[in-house]
Image: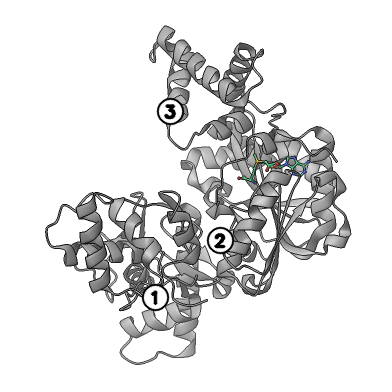
Amino acid sequence: MNNANSYDETPYPFLSYSETHPDLLAAIGTVMGMKPAPIHQCRVLDIGGASGGNLLPLALVLPQSQFVVVDYSGRQIEQGKEIAQALGLKNITFLHLDVMAMTPELGQFDYIIAHGLYSWVPAAVRDQLLAVIKQLLAPQGIAYVSYNLYPGWFYMQMMREMMLYHTRHISEPAAKAREARSFIHFLAEGVKADGGAFGLFLHSYLQVLNKDVRVDATLLHDELETVNDPVYFHQFAGHAAAHQLQYLAEADFDTVFPSNFPPPVTAKLLEMAQDTVELEQYMDFLRNRTFRKTLLCHAGVPLRRSLSPEQAQYLHFAARIRPLSGVPDITGDTVERFQALNEATFSTNHPVSKAAFIHLGQVAPRTVSFARLLTTALKQVYPTLPDQATINQNAALLAANLLQAAVYSPMLMELHTWQAPFTLEIADMPVASPYARWQARQQLQVTNLRHERIRLDGLTHFLLPQLDGTVDKTMLRERVAAASQTGTLTPPENADLAQEIDLALQWLAQAALLVSSF
Ligand SMILES: C[S@@+](CC[C@H](N)C(=O)[O-])C[C@H]1O[C@@H](n2cnc3c(N)ncnc32)[C@H](O)[C@@H]1O
């Protein structure tokens, strides 16, 4: 195999992606009528998984599950092995392998992830990728494949091709990235933001380019990589079908439901589209979509394409929401509005649903199983346990409301299949995620126990690596004071150090960075 490639030269940024979490894939599969493998005992494969930035934190929180990273960049695979060893992880394997050389000996996987690969490899590799997914996917397995998409990517293609033209004589990666950036700045100086569609797009692209997450490696591998072939969704679905794989849903689950468009648009969409693929294609046109995170399963697996509330019984839910009225009327039939952090709202007058939503808001971001949520909410509404018919009626309404909220916005209602091992309680000697502690020694951004990227500030960044279960608040206070004196840490603004540390620990707990148990 070819040992030298652009990823050996410039490794891809070390990143985790919450939308690839087997928990989300399992939850979506469950809503769609599948029986996905329980995530605490499953096999997960990441194809083109670089140095394991995505799978390493999952291997830590799911110790009974097995994880395999495949990548043809030897440098990235070696880096991943070193990190796994440093973290003492035994349930993750790194394989230096080309997609073209993958064989069924790797065994079957319940979840297969290929993030940022499909559009960036030659057609033969794309084809082999889907063939490998078909071969290695367990019967109720779910694959995640992300890719660049038309029509939205036509705009980006313009930027890509102009940058490639301008840097055509430069081969050294850092110089190429620098010159590509400076060229976009040059264009933006010459074209005003209000100079029509081109100016508008150019200036919005410049803003993206200026973000600190857009490091050179991202620019080089995403926009400027030798191969970058977007597709229309119908082409991708056709390619998958040719490999006997079927479209399950999108990891951005709210985008799957046409009901999220205004009613006349929904009606017209349903009239125009003859099947799921056409419906998704028309929705891409409406959204001018640039990127998809598509979930696939084997062709022939029976799916439920409309919401079936009975599937809720297999799920857990979490919701950072609050009722908009100061004192919600739970037991009466007043309509209550619940608001998420993104300001999306959901209204219901169903007492048990109101009680359940309030409970979820109180314990967020922890998850609650449907059965427990129903019991808790029933207790709030009924002084004594009602008869079975009433319980069933309430269960059906609650299930429908939970799923409706989830498909409206994941910020309103998250779908889960488990409770990640984090605690909101602050122990005398708190323990932070060992993975995040390791990351925090090198950078400000860490992955939490919910697999989300979290950006730390000065004090939380200072505290996190120290939370190994041997340090209490008094010791933390002494260390913060000492570091403030030596200038290692900018002194916290609040003179009351104990209070400032309490607030920081609460913030870390809410950010799902404190460990309960594995
Ligand atoms: C854009 S990066 C994405 C990395 C990671 N999945 C992510 O999203 O952060 C693409 C990765 O695929 C790997 N890759 C590209 N072609 C490959 C092939 N033919 N076989 C195996 N890995 C490949 C590269 O080395 C690189 O790590």
Q: Depth check: 444 or 146 in front?
A: 444
Marks 3 and 2, how far apart in space? 28 Å
Q: Which residue is mark 3?
A: 210
Residue at disc 1, secondary structure: loop
Q: Is residue 237 above or below residue 385?
A: above
Residue 509 x %, y %: 35, 66
At horizontal 48% and vertical 62% (from top left) the residue drawn is: 450
Whole-Å distance between the Cαs marked 1 and 2?
Answer: 19 Å
| Residue at point 19%, 54% (across, down) | 485
Instruction: Measure the alpha-carbon separation of dots 1 and 3.
Output: 39 Å
Position of 199 relative to 290 (above/below): above
**First in sequence: mark 1 vs mark 2:** 2
Residue 115 x, y percent position in the rendering: 65, 46
Q: Residue furthest front?
A: 486
- What type is the residue that disc 2 sits on? Pro
At label 3, which amino acid type do we have?
Answer: Asn
Question: Which disc is residue 213 wearing?
Answer: none
Residue that appears at 65% across and 41% down: 279
Judged from the image, the secondary structure of the residue bearing numbered disc 2 is helix
Ligand 1 is within 8 Å of the C-beta of the residue at disc 3: no
Q: Is residue 338 left or right of residue 327?
A: right
| Of residues 428 and 154, the one drawn nearer to the viewer in this rendering | 428
Sequence-earlier tag: 3 or 2: 2
Q: Amino acid at mark 1?
A: Gly
Is residue 27 at all visible to an observer of this figure?
A: no
Q: Which mark is residue 469?
A: 1
Q: Residue furthest left?
A: 495
